[in-house]
Image (spheres, rainbow, N blue to C red):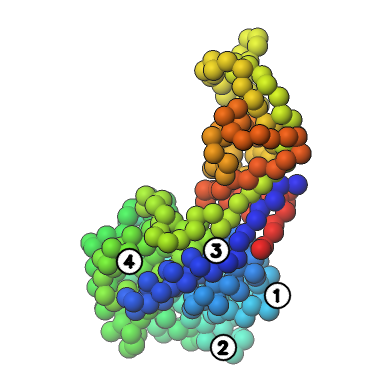
Amino acid sequence: MAILTVDLKKIAHNASLIVKRARQHDVSVYGVTKVLAGPWQVADVMLKSGVTAIADSRLENISKMRQHGISGPYVLLRLPRISEADKVVALTDISLNSELATLEALSQAALRQGVVHKVILMVDLGDLREGVWPTEFLDLVGEVVRLPGIKIYGIGTNLTCYGGVVPDASNMTQLLDLKEQASAIVGHNLEVSAGNSSTLPLLYENKLPRGVTNLRIGEGIILGRETVNRQQLPGAFIDACTISAEVIELKDKPSVPIGTIGQDAFGNVPQFENLGVRRRAILALGRQDTVPEGLLPLIPNAYILGASSDHLIVDVTDSEHLEVGDTLSFTLTYSALLAASTSEYVTKQYI
Ligand SMILES: *Cc1c(COP(=O)(O)O)cnc(C)c1O
């Protein structure tokens, strides 16, 4: 089995680093666990490192973490389904919202359960994923403020997810303006949840405007990178997560296939450069386990040549001596990590 190893000490280190930096700007951090499918071990170290809540996109993950004794608080990142309003209220403390019909369903659920559910209302500042259009935002606030069982806790936005829009002075100022007007309507000061790991460059360059009070951080903590240019955060570990798999064949072969070249297993016509005979390791790792394009070998001078569903071919000619049965380890990009976390073929190990 391929093994995904999550180093909890490194995650704790990254989380503390970001929390400390954020605190200097009066910004709190929600630790986002979704890319790892919500392991309680990671939630636990994030909370011990000072994040103020655990945020995840899926109720299944939050439910699992609760069952393992992690009491939260919890923030639901993906807009709730109306059909799961009762569960949202029962399992989470805060949810992100943009639809009045859903907020009405949450209000009814909160009344039934005799609790107050907090919501962060999302505004779309141009990235075109979730959120109310800015011109309609205050109307929504006016409607939601009347709903019993619901407390408007904050205003939020999410950038750099669909449209690749980068957080900057202009959209952050727009967010803070809307927050001022919304706070006047609700009668108390609102949390400003300004974004995800793509907002970290603003934080680190001391350009995050005063008034932003919260960031929701996954990749920054788990992979040690911001997500505008995917630069390593100063002092952070980028290898807290690694995947390893066993060498099942190790042979010298030519670098160009023999015969007429048609399509590969996925319908592409592959092209090859003739580099002579090379030493190739085949690993028991493939597209059913991860996204091979998102892997980087930890040993120097090893290069991934290609992959199919169950096989990863690595050129190890110029790398260290290997034998069949050895394991190779790789760091992962966000998409490779997401695939590995959610693949039932990959064993998860927390150290
Ligand atoms: C996934 C997600 C985040 C965290 O994103 P990272 O890039 O991993 O920091 C924050 N907010 C929302 C709404 C999300 O869906």
Binning the other alpha carbons within 10 Å of mark 2 as few (below 14), some (14 to 19) or many (20 upward) gives some
Q: Is residue 7 visible?
A: yes
- Give the answer, above or below, for where 171 lies relative to 47: above
Residue under label 3: 10
Residue 310 visible in the snapshot: no
Looking at the picture, which amino acid does disc 2 mark? Val
Q: Is residue 106 above or below residue 162?
A: below
Callout 2 secondary element: loop
The alpha-carbon separation of the residues under discs 4 and 2 comes to 35 Å
Q: Write the residue at 65% across / 9% down.
A: 259
Some atom of ligand 1 lies within 8 Å of the CB belonging to the residue at label 2: no
Label 4 or label 2, whichever lies nearer to me, is 4
Q: CA distance from mark 1 to mark 3?
A: 22 Å
Q: Amino acid at mark 3?
A: Lys
On residue 203, the disc is: 4
- The answer to whether 341 is drawn above or below residue 142 in the figure is above
Residue 80 image-quadrant placement: bottom right
Which quadrant does the C terminus fall into?
bottom right
Gap between marks 3 and 2, in whole Å?
Answer: 37 Å
2 vs 1, front mark: 1
Residue 328: image tag: none
Q: Nearer the viewer, residue 340 or 221?
A: 221
Q: Helix, strand or loop at disc 4?
A: helix
Examine the image and state in which quarter residue 205 appears. Answer: bottom left
Type of amino acid under label 1: His
